[in-house]
Image (cartoon, rainbow, N blue to C red):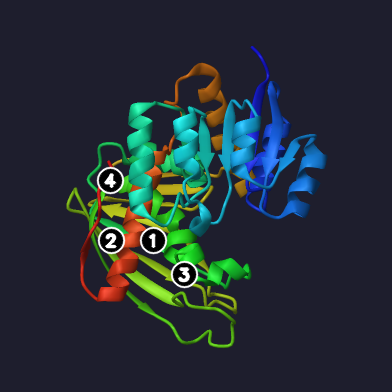
Amino acid sequence: MSELKIGFIGVGGVAQPHLNTLNSMDGVTISAVCDAFADRAQSVGEKFGATVYTDYHQLLQSEKLDGVYVCLIPGVHGDIELDLAKAGIPFYIEKPVHLELDACARVLDQIEKTPVINSVGYHWRYGAGSQGVKEFLEGRKISLVQGYWDGGFVGAPWWRQLALSGGQLVEQATHIVDLARYFAGEVKTVYSSATTGSMTEIENYDITDASITNLVFDSGAVGFISTGCIGEVEGDSKVDLTVKGRGFNAWSNSDAGRWNSKATGKGEVKGDQPWSDQLGNGDRAFITAIQSGDQSKILSDYRSGAQTLAVTLAANESMESGQPVQVRRFV
């Protein structure tokens, strides 16, 4: 099998574990990299022996690539994924996939016209703990979902700006929302409340400090997701998801999983994988899909990624309006 030539659009922090994983894989070459910051693009290009670009249009025009990673902040995606789909190039998108659902719809329409391998970086799905919980929950009726991403402030300047990140629920706690969908099915409506005003000394800060989002699932299950970026002392951090039904409960974070059933007793999986290795599980699934033409091992495709985005953007709308919001459907 010929060497796969992979390109990167965006080579900042989140791209680094992907670059390192692909660089260690047989049959894969990092052929081209693109970043709006020329110095960063040059540095990464030199490290991996890749051709360097600062304009992704030039990259797509000049390179014949077998796949492209898009590792950008949410608010600057524009038409990149649409252009990749039109060009028939398999793509892997870091989460969240965009900040505009109409843009996602255009990408999905194009994928329907010209099918192409696609994947989204929801690496929690690939963790051993999540897989163990997913298997345990098979056939069980879930009644309650409880999710948390309560922690500290992220220092990246773009993260504090709603127009660039979408806020904590959209950009960070999206992993919790996605895992809730993975375990409990689709979310029908959301009702969200949020607070702000405790981070006034931080320049250009216009996201919420904390939020509670109530969820109603298609199955009839209910749940909530709590977010907070105000944590500064011990005990402020809680990042995980619990699901419950009559006679059972299950818990997972990005790696480990536990469950307890009145009928079958307790179980546990300790994946012992750092998040970079969990990302690597998704990378390997994406590369295998390109090689085989079969993306059945990909656990989160673009359509699913768009659906998770739809839940979080509906929550943002509810925070603003103070009213329940029906989630736009892609799946």
Mark 2, residues whose alpha carbon is within 10 Å: few (<14), some, or many (≥20)? many
Mark 3–mark 2 Cα distance, whole angstroms, equals 25 Å
Of callouts 2 and 4, the N-terminal one: 4
The residue pinned by badge 4 equals 185
The quarter of the picture where the C terminus appears is top left
**Residue at x 43% of width, y 82% of height:** 196
Q: Circle 1 sits in a helix, a strand or a loop, which is it?
A: strand
Mark 1, residues whose alpha carbon is within 10 Å: few (<14), some, or many (≥20)? many
| Front one among 19 and 90 | 90
Q: Nearer the viewer, mark 3 or mark 4?
A: 3
User: Which label sits on residue 162?
Assistant: 3
| Front one among 155 and 113 | 113
Is residue 133 something that shows in the picture?
A: yes
Which picture quadrant has residue 112? Answer: top left
The residue pinned by badge 2 equals 223
Verify CB contact (< 8 Å) between mark 3 and mark 4. no
Q: Which amino acid does label 4 sit on?
A: Gly
